Image (cartoon, rainbow, N blue to C red):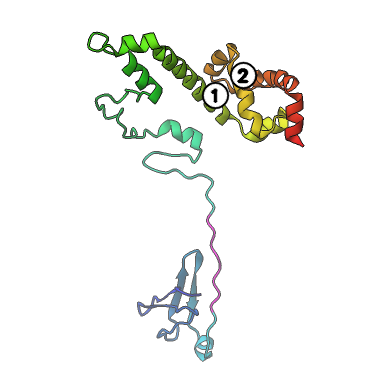
Amino acid sequence: MAATHVLNTTTKRATITDLDGFFSIEANLNDTLVFSAVQYKKKELIITAEVLAQKTLNIPLEESLTVLDEVIVTPYNLSGDIFKDLQIIKTEQVVTAQTVGLPNAYVRVPSKAERELFAATANPFMSFDPLINAITGRTKMLKKRLERDKLYSRTERVKEYYPDSIFRIDLKIPENKIDDLLYFCEVDSAFQSVVDSHDKLKIWDFIRRKSIVYRKNNTNSLEITEQ
């Protein structure tokens, strides 16, 4: 075997086997050779007259497998059970704007709709724009857009909870009608409170019940889509 260490403990001379497992070392009668390699048991060979008489010496090594019942990793005394070890290890906080206490770290970046509404209603004493926007109905339109964006983002979050296949298989809703079904759920005033509960089972039960009504109201279009 390649890279096996061969030591003559009598003469204190050593060598290493080559890629093909061959080696050459000086040895006299009654010398002791020790063979060692990673994952193999050490083997001793005493040079006898019979050994010296051989031109080629074949030394088989026995594999050494060490199986431990339990491993304790220091300095944390880990057990190997990840659930137990997570309670023991004290990890450093992830470096973020919040953990290092940077100014405005917790300030949420406003959306485009929020910025437009703020611009349309801010500084009523410095500009006539807020008054003009109110008269023309632009402020009302921007408020509706902001509410619609909030509903849309909430619906997108719900959609990420479940794979499209579950809508198709469990609810019999084609993939190209999933968004339409979720919009149908949106217009129900109870949908917002259900989604804000973050209870995925409760949310899915709500969608399932609404899908029954949705299918009854859209039987023809669903059948055409499924063909």
Q: Which residue is mark 2?
A: 185
* Front residue of this view, candidates 79 and 126: 126
Residue 14 is labelled as none
Q: Residues within 10 Å of mark 2 (few under 14, many from 20)?
A: many
* Front residue of this view, candidates 2 and 120: 120
Query: Residue at coordinates 42% horizontally, 86% vertically from top-left?
Result: 28
* The C terminus lies in quadrant: top right
Q: Label 2, secondary structure: give it.
A: helix
Query: Residue at coordinates 75% horizontally, 20% vertically from top-left?
Result: 216
Q: Which residue is mark 1?
A: 155
Q: Label 1, secondary structure: give it.
A: helix
Picture quadrant of residue 88: top left
**Region rendered in magenta:** 59-66
Query: Residue at coordinates 51% horizontally, 75% vertically from top-left?
Result: 1
Picture quadrant of residue 131: top left
- Tell whether position 62 is magenta: yes
* Front residue of this view, candidates 83 and 181: 181
153 up-or-down from 22: above or below: above
* Front residue of this view, candidates 61 and 97: 97
135 up-or-down from 49: above or below: above
Measured from the top left, where is residue 219 in percent x and y?
Answer: 76, 24
Q: CA distance from mark 2 to mark 1?
A: 9 Å
The three-letter code of the residue at mark 1 reads Thr
Q: Residues within 10 Å of mark 1 (few under 14, many from 20)?
A: some
Magenta span: chief secondary structure: loop
Q: Give left or right: position of 35 versus 224.
A: left
Report if the CB atoms under discs 2 and 1 are less than 8 Å apart: yes
